[in-house]
Amino acid sequence: MASDMRETNEIDHKDLGNGKLHDKHAFINPLDDTVTWFKCWKSNIEHVMMHYLQQLLIIVDPLLKSHDLRVATLEELSPEGKFFGQQHIFPKDIMLMKEGKTAETHIKIQLRKGPNKWDMFPLGEILDIFCHELAHCWGPKGHEDVFLRKWVQLRSELEKDLGGIVKVYKCDKRFKRMIKTQVKADRGLPPGELPPVPEYTRQPNAISMDAVERWEKTYQVMLQNAKTLDVKK
């Protein structure tokens, strides 16, 4: 099955929040023919970052489908911003989730860190940020037990989709401590009061694993280009 996105439209979009220009692209997901809007931070490697967003969507496709979710817009956050990720889901889609129907969410995610345009987060951390934002679809905006349990569940499911070739984990001491506290509480309470994260039987997904391979190859090429440009300077 083909895994390259097909571009359908392109427009310039002005972000009134900071005056920066973004290119906004509509792509058809070849896995189900749905349309997702992508938006990358304006830079001279924007086409490369667009490729990463496309592969990210393919990597998480089985995870999204297993929860009847789809990403309507996927946006790269500023490399110099203070947020690693943001998520928004409309009330109508929350109702669709409760009814067991397919719902849409909108996710923004930081792929790069700091002023160095070549410096990207490891894929495992990016996937963890994605799972973090996705987990907010099931609960309040805060980071309560419901959210933490869903986040851990999504990470576990995604790792199984990828056959264990990527560890979905971000070293955030605050959340690590909160999750550890929750696990201890779950084990210390009577059965059924706070059920632990359920184990799901999932098989590795070859298409998602191929997208991981493309991600890694693109990253190596990007690093090589960075070295070449540094030498030319």
Image: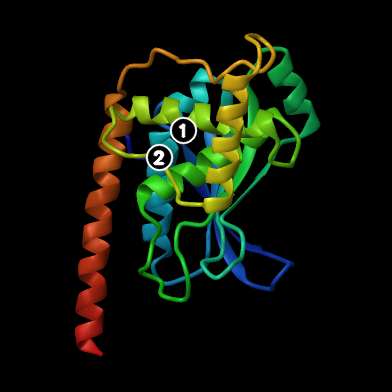
Query: Circle 2 is placed at which residue position?
Result: 168
Q: Residue 37: x and y, percent?
A: 56, 45
Quadrant where the C terminus sits is bottom left
Task: Identify the amino acid type marked 2.
Answer: Val
- Residue drawn at point x = 37 percent, y = 16 percent: 202
Q: Is residue 198 visible?
A: yes
Say which quarter of the image contains residue 225: bottom left
Say which quarter of the image contains residue 29: top left
**Mark 2 Cα-neighbour bin, 10 Å: few <14, some 14–19, many ≥20:** many
Q: Secondary structure at mark 2?
A: loop
Residues at circles 1 and 2 in contact by the CB criterion of under 8 Å: yes
For the residue pair 25 and 134, the one nearer the viewer reads as 134
* Mark pair 1, 2: CA separation: 6 Å
Q: Is residue 56 above or below residue 219?
A: above
N-terminal of the pair, mark 1 or mark 2, is 1
Q: Is residue 34 visible?
A: no
User: From this viewpoint, which residue is outermost toward the bottom?
Assistant: 233
User: From this viewpoint, which residue is outermost toward the right?
Assistant: 91
- Residue drawn at point x = 54 percent, y = 20 percent: 197
For the residue pair 69 and 43, the one nearer the viewer reads as 69
* Lateral position of residue 8 relative to residue 188, left or right: left
Q: Residue 6: x and y, percent?
A: 41, 40
Q: What colour scheme governs how the chains and residues are painted in the rendered image of this protein? A: rainbow
Q: Which mark is residue 155?
A: 1
Q: Is residue 97 above or below residue 53?
A: above
Quadrant where the N terminus sits is top left
Q: Secondary structure at mark 1?
A: helix
